[in-house]
């Protein structure tokens, strides 16, 4: 998806057009063919798998073992995901719903409270699926991303009930099966198939064929799966959500880690792992623990619809930043 020099290829340059077309197609399907759209729901896990699997073919097991020693990077994402994020979304919801929309009379008090609660649910658990796709598209450190995702999968099981009780005042029990399902489908299986694919292709065709022939084709597959998933999500449910959180947190984490001495790949990886949200878990909690409050689910259900185009915009900005860094490093060497 990028050219050999590391710059943006024509696919990335037209990515905004593809995203716009997919959103239009998805909304049109949802409006004019609602019954057909419901059958597309199975496409979401399939699309996510096909997005993550190509990234896993680029992982070397030796690098993965080294990434397991990344204690400082793990500490950074733990700090931002479990000390900063829940309270940041709490504050954004308070300002947006309670102090702006409610004060202007644009929303009833009950609706403001429910939507605020839904936003809080988005802040309590980091993403453990799509974040690997964003890391790969932005040319981040894929092996480090796997390690960070594994840690987030474990930690959020323990912290999510605490934060919901603290910020919402409702105690809920987390269904570990939801986490296990996500880890298996979006980490375990893609990693297994990726390792097997990489080993077999190298044995039969060689490393050069893998890097020059197969991976470019997998990059196309990854993009097509992403656009297909975007169509399905907008066909099922359309809406909007605050995007300030995504841009703000990613760039805070990125620049903080860069100042700490980490390279682009590691900083971008940590930025995505601190920004993406576990929408599957948030939606499940909203539909069970807050079943009598349908408005709570609104903030969580529309989250994935906006996350994809917003995170793709951040990927694009990151790749542009990567190009500038490479040019600066090249100029210094010369």
Image (tube, grey):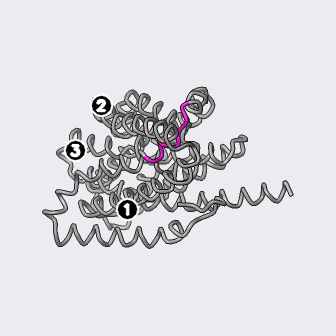
Q: Is residue 69 magenta?
A: no
**Image point (21%, 67%), residue name:** 30
Residue identified by numbered label 1: 227
How far across and how far down the image is residue 216, in percent? 51, 56
Q: Residue furthest left?
A: 35
Q: Residue at x 54, y 31 (%)?
A: 61
Seen in the picture, residue 224 relative to 68 is either above or below; the reply is below
Q: Which of the two marks, 3 or 1, is nearer to us in this view?
A: 1
Residue that lies at the very extreme toward the front in this rendered image: 204
The percent coordinates of residue 325 (x first, y second) are 72, 56
* Quadrant the C terminus occupies: bottom right
Seen from the viewer's position, the closer of residues 69 and 215 is 215
The quadrant holding residue 165 is top left
Could you tell which of marks 1 and 2 lies nearer the N-terminus?
Answer: 2
Contact (Cβ within 8 Å) of mark 1 with mark 2: no
Residue 55 is inside the magenta segment:
yes
Q: Nearer the viewer, mark 1 or mark 2?
A: 1
* Pointer 3 or 2: first along the chain: 2
Identify the secondary structure beneath mark 3: helix
> Which residue in the protein does label 3 denote?
287
Residue 99 seen in the figure: no
Q: Which residue is mark 2?
A: 174
Q: Nearer the viewer, residue 44 or 72?
A: 44
Q: Residue at x 26, y 50 (%)?
A: 297
Disc 3 to disc 2, C-alpha distance: 13 Å
Which residues are drawn in magenta? 54-61
């Amino acid at each position: 998806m990028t050219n050999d020099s590391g710059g943006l290829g024509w696919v990335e340059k037209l990515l905004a057009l593809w995203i716009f077309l997919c959103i239009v197609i998805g909304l049109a399907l949802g409006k004019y063919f609602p019954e057909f759209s419901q059958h597309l729901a199975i496409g979401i896990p399939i699309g996510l798998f096909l997005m993550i699997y190509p990234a896993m073919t680029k992982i070397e097991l030796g690098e993965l073992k080294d990434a397991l020693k990344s204690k400082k990077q793990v500490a950074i994402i733990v700090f931002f995901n479990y000390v900063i994020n829940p309270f940041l979304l709490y504050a954004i919801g308070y300002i947006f719903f309670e102090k702006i929309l409610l004060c202007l009379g644009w929303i009833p008090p009950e609706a403001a409270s429910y939507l605020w609660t839904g936003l809080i649910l988005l802040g309590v658990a980091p993403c453990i699926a799509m974040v690997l796709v964003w890391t790969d598209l932005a040319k981040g450190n894929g092996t480090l991303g796997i390690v960070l995702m594994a840690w987030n999968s474990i930690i959020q099981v323990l912290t999510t009930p605490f934060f919901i009780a603290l910020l919402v005042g409702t105690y809920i029990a987390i269904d570990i099966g939801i986490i296990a399902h996500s880890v298996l489908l979006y980490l375990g299986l893609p990693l297994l198939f990726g390792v097997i694919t990489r080993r077999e292709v190298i044995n039969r065709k060689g490393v050069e064929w893998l890097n020059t022939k197969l991976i470019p084709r997998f990059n196309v597959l990854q993009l097509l799966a992403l656009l297909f998933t975007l169509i399905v999500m907008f066909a099922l449910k359309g809406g909007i959500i605050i995007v300030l959180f995504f841009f703000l947190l990613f760039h805070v984490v990125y620049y903080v880690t860069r100042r700490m001495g980490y390279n682009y790949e590691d900083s971008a990886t940590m930025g995505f792992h601190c920004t993406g949200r576990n929408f599957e878990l948030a939606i499940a909690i909203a539909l069970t623990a807050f079943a009598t409050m349908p408005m709570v689910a609104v903030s969580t259900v529309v989250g994935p619809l906006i996350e994809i185009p917003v995170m793709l915009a951040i990927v694009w900005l990151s790749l542009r930043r990567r190009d500038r860094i490479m040019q600066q490093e090249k100029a210094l060497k010369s």
